Image: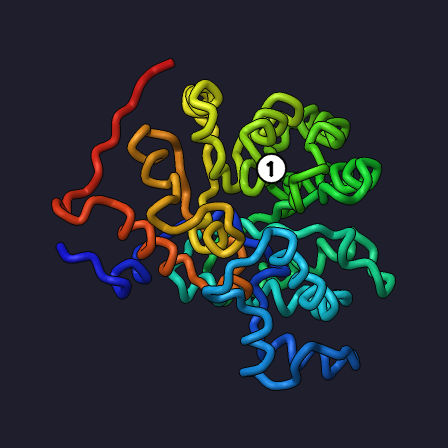
């Protein structure tokens, strides 16, 4: 059977690494800005889309992250969070996603007085609306931020505990890795783990495998966001493999942020061939101008083109 993008879009897919504040519709940003009297870098769809989308321009992770200041500026009310979460649910459904996990950091949505708990309720409302209309299943991952104080991460961890079994399914640590080690946020992750909540950390994206080591051994990571640098430490990679720690792979954004030089250099196929558990994800649909279907299509291009066969899986009891 010939694999086409149309087929990939129709196939049921999960997505585990998708940022709410990185996946807004451009037209929604324009409308929310007009409603809230917020100045954006451009006031037309074409102009704003060009500014927000990284496209083929390579940037540093820090430059990539700066674009979130723009999306966050229009996401400071419950109504805006409900709308953007709802629309993301619809967009994911159109993309063939049957279950997805939406991650965001409530602390970044409090500039106009909304509480962190109110923000979670608002996101839940939007996702519930999408589920009721199109049937998509979802979960929320609350993010701590590396460059914000560990005390704030602890508050976010406590919020995660409060919403356990009420829509929130995990806790994350996001943001620039260099100079902001995960071990500083260990107390927050201790609280999460003691309450039997799953953890995933951004690690090994723009910093070395020692970042992944901290995520696992200081913070108890059950999954790793990105993990492109893991291959630099074969011993740690074996540990990740033996303990079934899944990698949330985001091909397009990894290339755009120069985490890898090109698609051909991406370790996705290397991990796949070595039987690591890999998942494909968009990361940020807006900034990276991508869909999950696009990511699967890119992944196919990294696999051998001469067989057309489905890959064989090998299992080993530990």
Query: Residue 182 placed where, x, y %?
Result: 68, 32
Q: Which residue is mark 1?
A: 201
User: Residue visible at 45% across and 46% down?
Assistant: 260
The answer to whether residue 120 is left or right of residue 229 is right
Q: Work out which residue is located at the far top of the displayed protein and give it.
A: 318
The quadrant where residue 196 appears: top right
> What quarter of the picture does the C terminus occupy?
top left
Q: Could you say whether the residue bearing mark 1 is in a helix, strand or loop?
A: strand
> What quarter of the picture does the N terminus occupy?
bottom left
- Residue situated in front as seen by the camera: 218 or 105: 218
Query: Residue 166 placed where, x, y %?
Result: 66, 45
The answer to whether residue 316 is left or right of residue 182 is left
User: Residue visible at 57% across and 48% down?
Assistant: 139
Instruction: From this view, report whether residue 2 is shown above or below residue 249.
Output: below
User: Residue visible at 40% across and 63% down?
Assistant: 95
User: Residue visible at 65% across and 85% down?
Assistant: 43
Query: Residue 178 placed where, x, y %?
Result: 67, 39
Q: Is residue 284 visible?
A: yes
The answer to whether residue 160 is left or right of residue 19 is right
The quadrant where residue 211 appears: top right
Instruction: From this view, report whether residue 287 is shown above or below residue 140.
Output: below
- Residue situated in front as seen by the camera: 207 or 269: 207
Q: Work out which residue is located at the far right of the displayed protein and give it.
A: 113
Q: How many marks?
A: 1
Q: Is residue 289 visible?
A: no
The quadrant where residue 109 appears: bottom right
Q: Residues within 10 Å of mark 1 (few under 14, many from 20)?
A: many
């Amino acid at each position: 059977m010939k694999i086409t993008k149309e087929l990939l879009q129709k196939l049921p897919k999960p997505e585990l690494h998708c940022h709410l504040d990185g996946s807004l519709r451009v037209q929604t940003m324009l409308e929310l800005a007009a409603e809230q009297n917020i100045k954006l870098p451009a006031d037309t769809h074409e102009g704003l889309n060009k500014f927000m989308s990284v496209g083929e321009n390579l940037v540093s992770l820090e430059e990539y992250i700066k674009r979130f200041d723009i999306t966050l500026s229009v996401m400071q009310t419950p109504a805006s969070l409900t709308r953007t979460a709802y629309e993301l649910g619809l967009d994911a459904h159109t993309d063939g996603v049957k279950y997805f996990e939406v991650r965001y950091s409530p602390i970044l949505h409090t500039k106009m007085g909304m509480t962190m708990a109110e923000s979670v309720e608002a996101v839940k409302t939007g996702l519930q609306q999408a589920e009721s209309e199109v049937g998509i299943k979802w979960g929320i991952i609350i993010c701590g931020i590396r460059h914000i104080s560990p005390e704030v991460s602890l508050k976010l961890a406590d919020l995660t505990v409060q919403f356990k079994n009420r829509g929130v399914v995990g806790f994350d640590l996001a943001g620039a890795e260099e100079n902001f080690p995960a071990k500083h946020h260990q107390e927050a992750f201790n609280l999460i783990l003691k309450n039997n909540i799953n953890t995933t950390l951004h690690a090994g994206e723009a910093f070395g495998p020692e970042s992944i080591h901290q995520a696992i051994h200081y913070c108890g990571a059950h999954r790793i966001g990105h993990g492109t640098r893991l291959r630099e430490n074969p011993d740690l990679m074996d540990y990740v493999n033996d303990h079934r720690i899944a990698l949330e792979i985001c091909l397009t954004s990894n290339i755009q942020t120069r985490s890898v030089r090109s698609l051909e250099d991406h370790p996705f196929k290397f991990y796949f061939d070595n039987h690591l558990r890999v998942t494909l994800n968009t990361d940020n649909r807006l900034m990276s101008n991508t869909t999950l279907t696009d990511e699967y299509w890119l992944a196919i291009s990294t696999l051998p083109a001469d067989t057309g066969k489905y890959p064989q899986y090998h299992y080993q009891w530990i």
